[in-house]
Amino acid sequence: MLEERRIDTLVFGMGCFWSPEANFGQLPGVLRTRVGFAGGTKSDPTYRQMGDHTETVEVTYDPDAISLEQLLRKFWNDHNPNRPAYKERQYISLLLYQNAEQKTIMEAVKQQLEVERKNTVYTEIAPLHDFTEAEPHHQKYYLKRFKKATEQLMTHFPSEAAFHTSTITSRLNGFVREYGTLASIKEEIAQWNISEDEAIRIQEMLDGLRW
Ligand code: MHO
């Protein structure tokens, strides 16, 4: 049951936010994803006017299923922080902690990596103040390239916001970007802590999608 689950969030920047949303969104243990702007001071940032903010992804996950260390290892495996930032701060490598524990783990894993790689890891680690959600067309960006499937999926959600924050759309957004397979999503659903009826309903929804 969702109420009994522990839930944590991790906010990070690793370049254009479309791909990391898809990449982390396909991971079992990740419950939902959002893209937005964070790390800067400008109020009410938008894509066109993000000021000193960075494109970031907010990953909500079940820490009993996937650990912060695992997410951080993936973060550093899947982009190259050893390069100077361009476009000011929009695409910098950035980790934003929300408490002392996150900060300690981020700094420890970064230090381990620097030893392993014998190289400086140019990732900024800073406190999270605000996360401003990006415009709707940036959310689940790759999935929305598939207009038919998106329209069909939308009918299963009460609102566009619910579509954006669901686990199944996170997985599908990863699948269309080739970060996972439909078969692996289906296998995973069979393990979800939901009723059999609900699992069948989701499987049927997936089988009925027209891409
Ligand atoms: N328009 C750029 C970056 C988009 S990302 C949301 C591109 O297609 O590469 O910054």
Image (tube, rainbow, N blue to C red):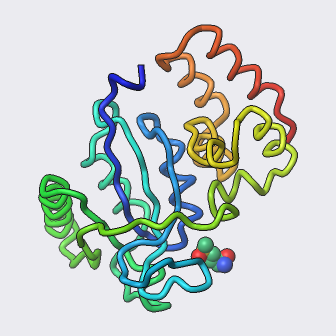
Residue 159: quadrant of the picture: top right
How far across and down, in percent of the image, does residue 3 sit? 37, 25
- In the picture provided, is 77 more to the left or to the right than 32? left
Quadrant of the image occupied by residue 72: bottom left
How far across and how far down the image is residue 84, in percent? 37, 88
Residue at 62% of width from left, 84% of height from top? 48
> Taking 191 as reference, is 87 above or below it?
below
**Side of 177 relative to 22 (left or right):** right
Which quadrant contains ligand 1? bottom right
Query: In the image, what residue occupies the spot 58% across and 39% down?
Result: 166
Classify 106 as above or below 183. below
Q: Is residue 79 above or below residue 75?
A: below
x then y, percent, for residue 66: 33, 37
Pick the residue in front: 42 or 151.
42
Q: Which residue does the image show at 37% across and 54% down from the upper left?
A: 74
Residue occupying image coordinates x 55% and y 37%: 167
